[in-house]
Amino acid sequence: MKEEIRNLLEEFLPLVDLDSDFLFAELDSLGVTAIMMTLSEKYGITLEVEDATPKNLRNLDSIVYMVKSKIS
Amino acid sequence: MMIEAYIRHHAETMPDKVAVVNGSQYVSYGCLWRKIQERADELRKNGLRQGGVVVMHTSQTIDFLVGYFAVHLAGAVAMPLEKSMPEKRFNELSERFARFNPPEGVADILFTTGTTGNSKGVMISHDTIIADAENLVESHGYTSQTVFVVCGPLNHIGALSKVYPVMMQGSTLVILDGMRNLEAFFQAMDYPSDKMATFLVPANVRMLLMLAKKRIALLADRIDFIESGAAPLSHADMKALCELLPNTRLFNTYASTETGIIATYNYNDGRCMAGCMGHTMKHAGVRIDSDGRIVCRGRTLMTGYANDFEMTSRILRDGELYTADLGRIDADGMLHLVGRMDDVINVGGLKVDPVEVENVAMELPQIADCICVQVEHPVAGLALKLIVVMKDGESMDRKIIARFISQTLESYKVPLIYEQVDNIRRTFNGKPDRKSYRV
């Protein structure tokens, strides 16, 4: 799943280092929303404002964790 | 008259009133005025000359605002630059304007792609700042009770122009660093007041509707007004916001760095007309010329482009400013936006000249040809796409191209989408055929 999400996000975040542990700091508001929207659509999950936190978007692993916990 | 005179007045008459909030930092009007005076003294001691240009890195902080007002108080001109502007470009501009003498009365030089494409330094006078502030106070009803949450970059007219009415009326300004942390936005909107207000570009509205409908609805009784502008708001989003906030005044405003704040329309009026910009404000006038172009007049117009007489005279003639926007005026005298005359692309409220992006991309040795076009984006409305032809034997790497462009241009000018093709379509006279790529 991690690689799948990486490939998805790379498509519209060309300037963001997806290996960074400070991913949230590299994002702007469009980036945050686009991530939430893309993941919602891809995995059929509901992501809301409470999910778009610096903790959940800290790095690729935390994003994967968020998606997995929503699916389960 | 300068906007700083109002801050001094509030410092004398209501020194303890909260002027600006930024995270856990609060500053009263009394304290804000002291800080501004101290900073202005420092600037004078350090040899700042009257009428000189002070180039500043913009930050979403109280300290930035103190510096901005202090430059004015010290008799100089503020030139706040985009925080994501690469160092190379910042230094270039600093050098270019080091010895520039703006005309008397100029307060700011704001950089924008705006009406003409390509980045230009737009000179704004103190009188224009006052006229913009009075327009907004009268049309949107700012009072000393208003608490205005500003999320956009403070070097951009959309956000900076809201600082003026707040300071004029002795309201409270809450500064946020963008909208990426939506929790921070909602915390700011939890400020204890039922006169909350904010400015949201259409992309911000889209974000809130996508991720936080329930949270917005909970604020229905506390939001006095929301202003939008800088790019067209979709009719669906306008209607959705009207439903969520039935008692809130929802404004669409026609403004730009060059024209100042011109017209506004409360679309929560039962009609919710898309593209309507409403009636002109008290210090502005509008007419449509024979080409369908919106022509503005009044005290809110820019003084001119810094160091560019030719470009100024192209759009500013006989006290009228010829925009690149196409419009019409309806039977009730309300202005409606119809489209644009040029190739400028509006990305989330920020205007980008595609030629500027192409010129930078073409400096990358592996690229043989390219064209920058607009594509639909579910959040921003429009996004930039760079279509490239690579030189023989080279293959496209979107990260390399994006990072190369970001070394020269601000991050919002870096395309999000990339596509490699065999050739770029051109018109009969060899120019890139932009229309054929338009969505």
Image: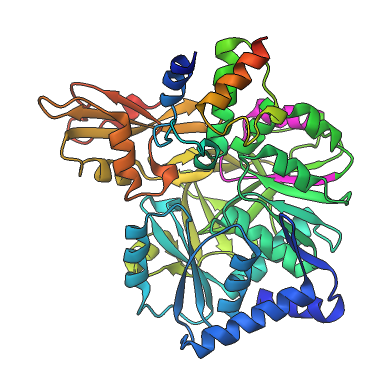
Instruction: Identify which residue is drawn at 79% across, 37% down.
Output: B268
Seen at 49% across and 45% down, the residue is B350
Q: Please report the residue visible at 37 percent of the width from the left and 45 percent of the height from the top.
A: B353
Q: Quadrant of residue B401?
A: top left
Which sits in the foreground, B101 or B183? B183
Q: Quadrant of the C terminus of chain A?
A: top right
**Is residue B161 found left or right of B352 in the rendered image?**
right
Residue B163 appearing in the image? yes
Residue B225 part of the magenta segment: yes
Give the residues drawn in magenta, as a range.
B223-243
Residue B270 visible, this angle:
no
Residue at the outermost left position: B392
Given residues B360 and B122, the one toward you in this image is: B360
Looking at the picture, the colour scheme in use is rainbow
Left or right: B132 in relation to B380: right
- Residue B109 lies within the magenta run: no
